[in-house]
Structures are given as C-alpha cells and as structure tokens.
C-alpha cells in the first residue's frame, strides 16, 4: 500500500516533468524588424505577454514594455545577464535597447522573480 508521502513524491515528480516539457516546447515570438532593429512589444499584466522572445545574435533589439497594472512586483524588469534593470511606470511604454553578442537563453524577471520571461538568442 502506498503512503501519502509516496503519492506526493510521485505527484511532484510528474508535475515537474510536465513543466519541463511544457516550457521546452514553447517557441519564441520573433520580433518584427524596423531599420535593422528587432522590435518586440510586451504587455505586463499579471505576466509578461509574450513571455518568450526570439532574436538574432549581433542585431540590435528593442523591447517595448507596457505595464497595465499597479502591482508593485511588476514595477521593474531585470535582464541580469545583460546587467539591465529598468523601471516600468504604470500605463507608459518603456523601451529597452541592446545588441546581444552571444547565443543562448536568458531570463528576464521582475524584482521578486514572480514574473518571468525568456529571451532566446539564435
């Protein structure tokens, strides 16, 4: 007979595997290109939407964040691998611009890491 602890462990492992499969199968939104710059529009309202962005290495990126909420958690966005932290005033569009120099997957988050997104550089 299974104990409650065994059932919980199996359940947690199953949820973890499902989460890995779900997040690995998410394709990124490819930015539209304007004057050689890759442009992304991200809505901040409970989550980052879209939360997965796909861009090309060596080409400038402009990510325009629009925060449509007052939650303190979403007040800042951080790109730790690029040493970028920017305030997102409610109702305003804030642009972050940089040129990625290496391929990989990079996390962007709010200050408390409750809102998360991925920037995939190919």
Image (tube, rainbow, N blue to C red):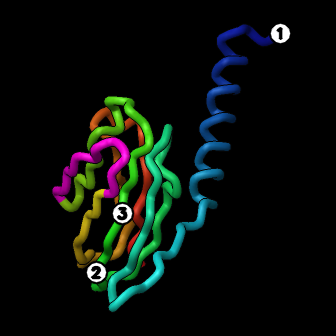
Q: Is residue 20 above or below residue 56?
A: above
Q: Earlier in the sequence, mark 1 or mark 3?
A: 1
Where is residue 112? Give x, y as percent: 31, 33
Instruction: Assess disc 3: are there few (<14), some (14-19) or many (≥20) residues with their C-alpha within 10 Å of its C-alpha.
Output: some
* Residue 91 among those drawn in magenta: yes
Label 1 near label 2: C-beta < 8 Å? no
Residue bearing the label numbered 2: 60
Q: Nearer the viewer, residue 22 or 6?
A: 22
Q: State the residue at coordinates (28%, 47%).
A: 88
Which residues make up the magenta segment?
83-93
Residue, far left: 83
**Rendered-image quadrant of the N terminus:** top right
Q: State the residue at coordinates (69%, 35%).
A: 14
| Mark-to-mark CA distance, 2 and 3 | 13 Å
Where is residue 67? Give x, y as percent: 39, 46
In this image, 106 relative to 10: left or right? left
């Amino acid at each position: 007979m299974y104990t409650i602890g065994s059932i919980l462990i199996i359940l947690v492992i199953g949820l973890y595997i499902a989460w890995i499969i779900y997040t690995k199968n998410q394709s990124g939104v490819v930015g539209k290109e304007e004057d050689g710059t890759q442009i992304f529009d991200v809505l901040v309202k409970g989550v980052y939407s879209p939360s997965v962005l796909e861009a090309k290495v060596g080409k400038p990126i402009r990510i325009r964040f629009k925060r449509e909420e007052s939650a303190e958690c979403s007040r800042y966005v951080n790109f730790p691998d690029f040493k970028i932290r920017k305030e997102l005033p409610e109702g305003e569009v804030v642009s972050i611009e940089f040129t990625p120099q290496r391929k990989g997957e990079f996390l962007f988050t709010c200050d408390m890491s409750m809102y998360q997104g991925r920037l995939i550089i190919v």
